[in-house]
Amino acid sequence: MPQQPTITRQVCSDGVQRVSPTYVIRWPPAATIPASEQRALQFRPISRKVCSTGLSSCKVHPAAPGKRTPTILCIGDSLTSGSRGSFSYPEELQAMLEQAGIDMKVSNGGNWGDTTDQIRRRLPSLMQSVMSQGGRLAFVLVLAGTNDLLQLPPLEATVSVSIPRIAGKIKEILDIASQAAFHPHVGILSLPPLLSRDVGRLKLNQSLRQLFGAPGLLHRSQVPGAGARFLVDLDTVDAALSTDGVHYGQEGYNQFAKRVMQVILPMLKADAAHGGLAVSSISA
C-alpha cells in the first residue's frame, strides 16, 4: 500500500508559515532490527520560497490542494483590528455573512499602529497563513493610511506633498494582493472621519477615487480569471460614532461592514452563478 504523506508546518526565519507533505520511509523494516538501530528518512519536496519583503514580484502560492474555505482577508491598522478589547469591522462582517447564509470566513489581519509600509510587509505572510490553514482567498480588503497621516506634521503643505506618496503605497499593497493564488477580488476602503487630520483624510480619499474610481465601481483586469478591484466608501460614516476621534465602537464598525456588504454581495452572487466561488445559500 503506498505510503501516505503527512502534512508538516514550518515557520521559517522570515516569519512565513509554510506547509509541505512529508513522506516517512522506514528502512529496513522496523520488525527486523533492534529499535536502537532503526532509522527514518524524510523526503520533502522543494517548494518555492514566498517572499516577505512586500515586493510586487512576490507571488503567494497555495500550500496544499483540496477543498478550501472561501476567505475574506481584512488587512490594515487598528481600524481593522478593532480597539483593544472592543469590536471590529471584520467581526461585524462575519456576522452579516452568516446572517445572509453565506459560508465564508473573515480573517482579521489588522495590527495596531501599522503604517502602509508595515501593512505591505505583512501582507504576503498573511495571505500564506490563510492558505496554509485551508483557506481560499476570495477577497482582500485593505484599510490603510490612517497612521501615515497621523505621523505627519499638521502643516497643509506637508500633507499635500505626502498624499500622493501614501496613495502610491496603498496601490502597491493592492498590487501584491492581486497576485495571490486564486486571483482574489481586492478592495480598498477609504478612510472614515478622522478628527485631527480630516483635511488630509479627505485629500487621500480623493486620490483613492482617482486611482480606483467611484465607490462600488468594479475594475476588471484584462488578465483571464483575475479578480476585480473596487473602492468601498467610508467617507459618510457618522463621525459621532467615533470613540476618540480615530477609532469606533460597535455601531461604527457595523457601518463599515454594511458598506463592504453592499459592494461584495453582488460580486458573491455573480461568482457563485459562474461557478467561480464555492459559497452556499446565496439566492439570486
Image (spheres, helix red, strand yellow):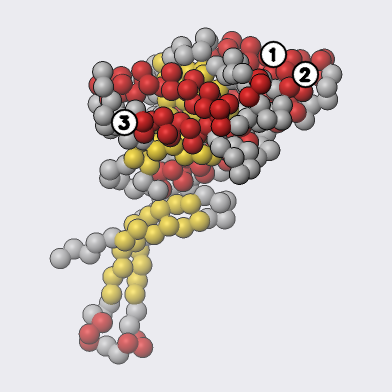
> Residue 139's quadrant in the figure?
top left
Residue at (38%, 42%) from the top-left corner?
135
Give the Cα separation between the discs numbered 3 and 2: 44 Å
The disc labelled 3 sits on which kind of residue?
A: Gly
Give the Cα separation between the discs numbered 1 and 3: 38 Å
Give the Cα separation between the discs numbered 1 and 2: 9 Å
> Who comes first in sequence, dot 3 or dot 2?
3
Q: Nearer the viewer, residue 77 or 243?
A: 243
Q: Please state, as top left, top right, bottom left or bottom right, where the C terminus lies in the image.
A: top left
Q: Give SS at disc 3.
A: loop
Residue bearing mark 2 = 159
Q: Tell me if label 1 and label 2 are in contact, CB under 8 Å.
A: yes
Q: Give SS at disc 1.
A: helix
The disc labelled 2 sits on which kind of residue?
A: Val
Residue bearing mark 1 = 203
Residue bearing mark 3 = 101
Whether residue 100 is visible, yes or no, is yes
